[in-house]
Image (tube, rainbow, N blue to C red):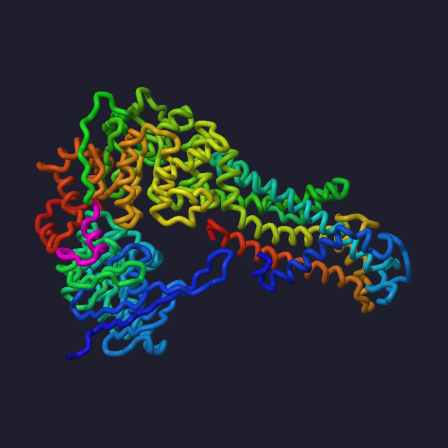
Amino acid sequence: MSDPFVKVRDLRIGATVYPPGEKPHDIEIVHGVSFDLEKGRVLGLIGESGAGKSTIGLATMAYGRGGVRITGGEVWVNGRDIMQSSLGDLRRLRGGEVTYVSQSAAASFNPAKRIMEQVTEAAIKQGKFSRHEAEQRAVYLFKKLGLPDPEHIGRRFPHQVSGGQLQRCMTALALCPEPDLVVFDEPTTALDVTTQIEVLMAIKEAIAATGVAALYITHDLAVVAQVSDDIMVLKTGDMVEYGTTDQIINNPQEEYTQALVSVRSIDHEEKQPSPSPALKIENVTARYRGTNFDVLKNVNVELHPGQTLALVGESGSGKSTLARVITGLLPQRVGRIHFAGRDLDPVMKNRSKEDLRELQLIYQMADTAMNPRQTVGTIIGRPLEFYFGLKGKEKQKRIQDLLDQIELGEGFQDRYPAELSGGQKQRVCIARALAAKPKMIICDEVTSALDPLVADGILKLLLDLQKIEDVAFLFITHDLATVKAIADSVAVMYRGEVVRYGTKSDVLSPPFDDYTDLLLSSVPEMKLGWLEEVIAHRKMESAGN
Amino acid sequence: MIKNMPLSAMIGLFFVCLYFAMAIFAPWLAPYGMAEVVGDVWEPSSAAHWLGTDNIGRDLLTRMIYGGQTTIYIATAATILSFTMGSVLGFLAAVLGGWADQLLSRSVDLVMSIPSLILALVILSVMPVTVPILIVVMGVLDSTRVFRLARAVAVDINAMEFVEAATLRGEGRGWVIFREILPNALSPLVAEMGLRFIFAVLFISTLSFLGLGVQPPLADWGGIVKENKDGIVYGIGAALYPAVAIATLAISVNLVADWILNRTTSLKGGRG
């Protein structure tokens, strides 16, 4: 039996950490991972952040990023151990035999050069093709990837195509030198669901057409189930489970894999609307200063006390703008915002302290939402001091109560945000909002930046807190699984308008309007063959195209 | 903290401490009186006069110690003034935005468009040249550069969500500037402070050399160069001692500033 095309044996990767106040020391971040990959097959690497997925992906190019070192093991590509290769050999390998597609095409393309120049660069530099041949191949790939106007799109600059198109250009870039192995590192994570599905299909078809071996790295099991033949589940640098896609999805053996497969299965019964809404938005229209384009057009929604209204839509649909209008950061041009029995002043500066207290906001990125130079105690304690004048022991006790409520417990008061994990940071932000005893909290994509299992924990916490504190949530999200888990009513937004609004069961059951149908059908499902089914039933192009 | 100190920072800190100690304890350390004529013109080094004597027979070591005191005192005071003024105004411009920002920024541009040495010479030629006035003129002129830096850093921080969160809470400007922005802007400012201090030393030395700085008989490093510059023609190195002092101080302060910058950015919660 011949050796597999890519053979990784007992791969060990280490790095040096520099904890403040301590001596730098070495740690191991990948502990002996092994796998095989044949040409024409796709291996999915899946795990939470810090699982070592990308590190393993880059190791197949014999590369360690940012001080990361490959400390042991073998990586065989095409019959040779690339760990033993000379630098010259590695140069021919990288960008020639093995290529890489990164998460953010926008950050990876050079904005000053035309797309065609960048797509063909590696193939020409590696001497695989002449300029003319490389450009012909690029056009062929553009066509295969379903890009509009494949003959001429290469003449554009990166900013002249949409995010989904650029991601496909990046795939063309990786496939152009006829590589043997392509590493896809979260290629669709930064895209909207409706765009993701098209890019996913394009990548899948291109892999099939060119017959390369591919490593597909992602944190989304539903996505990887659509493209890969085998899946390896990773957790903190250890292999948890390795098997065919069918086995991992339909018959997971390990507890951790089972948890990943059944993520977002929170059951939430929708509540009946009450007679007096907590928040009533009437005919709100808004635009940003210096533009002549309404980003919100005649929006009407209501939110009832102790309930959750989910605002869904893709990026650019006006979800976050509505949050800015409600908080008064962007005064509306037309319309009224009725909150807790009174009209809110459109301008934040004119609102009373009481208005500000009763309406709190939680951000998507907990990292930037907390001052890195303040301790958790200060962050949570400040609203207590500011709104209620709490001091000393009383304040300490209340901070500890809030920390208990967000399930963090003792010993967190003196920590800085940098000493918390992603999920813990978001919990502290929730505690800061709760400290103000608000009537309503706007949650702006609060789980989008988190790993699926951590996000699940946050959603459960929010639901529990809602029961105890009787607070209303305006939940902004692009993720319909989250909506199903948490919402009582739903408003679907598209290009600044609410296209569908009602109770959760009404909005999420047919008959659908075209956009809601597109949005609902784009959410990857945890089953094999879903992608093909959906593409076959497409009615409408996404807003990105 | 001191345990993990790199060698370069240790050398820097040693010289900085040495110079500042000499400046503070000058009257006790100096072997003679500041303006006392104790020997012949330009005597070479001897046991009585370690560095020799200057152009009118004063002890050069004494002049150097007192000169260091004047120079370091003026430079320190000017740096403190420029940092207080520059960073407060810079933060204010960033937080207020709009016309207030425009007014402050354009005024600063106006001052910066004139070479600061020329501007200082013009101002000092019409005003009485005393130490407090020197400090104010240098501090104000230098604060334009601090303003630029502080504003640029604060504009970045001001756009962060934790500042927006504070604004939405209803916090006043004072809290936003001193509790949200300042702690995060500190490390670039501290690094800049070392650099600006050295520029202040050079600036006051230049002014004195040109005769519009510290007035005789008060000693200062720039003045000592000026008084003894003619000696160079005769092979007398008296003018070179202050030059060496300025150079070592400049390098040492920068070594320390680099180390402080590294320390603060790797602190808990550092943003570097």
The percent coordinates of residue B151 (x first, y second) are 52, 43
* Front in this rendered view, residue A24 or A480: A24
Establish if B183 lies above or below B6: above
Establish if A432 lies above or below A89: above
Quadrant where the image shows the N terminus of chain A = bottom left
The percent coordinates of residue A298 (x first, y second) are 24, 29
* Front in this rendered view, residue B119 or A197: A197
* Front in this rendered view, residue A537 or A412: A412
At x 89% / y 54%, what residue is drawn? B36
The percent coordinates of residue A19 (x first, y second) are 46, 57
The percent coordinates of residue A83 (x first, y second) are 33, 75
Position of B197 compared to B36: left or right?
Answer: left
Please count the marks in the image.
0
Whether the magenta-drawn stretch holds residue A281 is answered as no
At x 26% / y 45%, what residue is drawn? A456
Q: Which residues are magenta?
A: A249-264
* Front in this rendered view, residue A191 or A368: A368
At x 28% / y 75%, what residue is drawn? A127
Establish if B149 lies above or below A213: above
Task: Note whether residue A334 is visible.
Answer: yes
Task: Note whether residue A178 is visible.
Answer: no
Give the quadrant of residue A515. Answer: top left
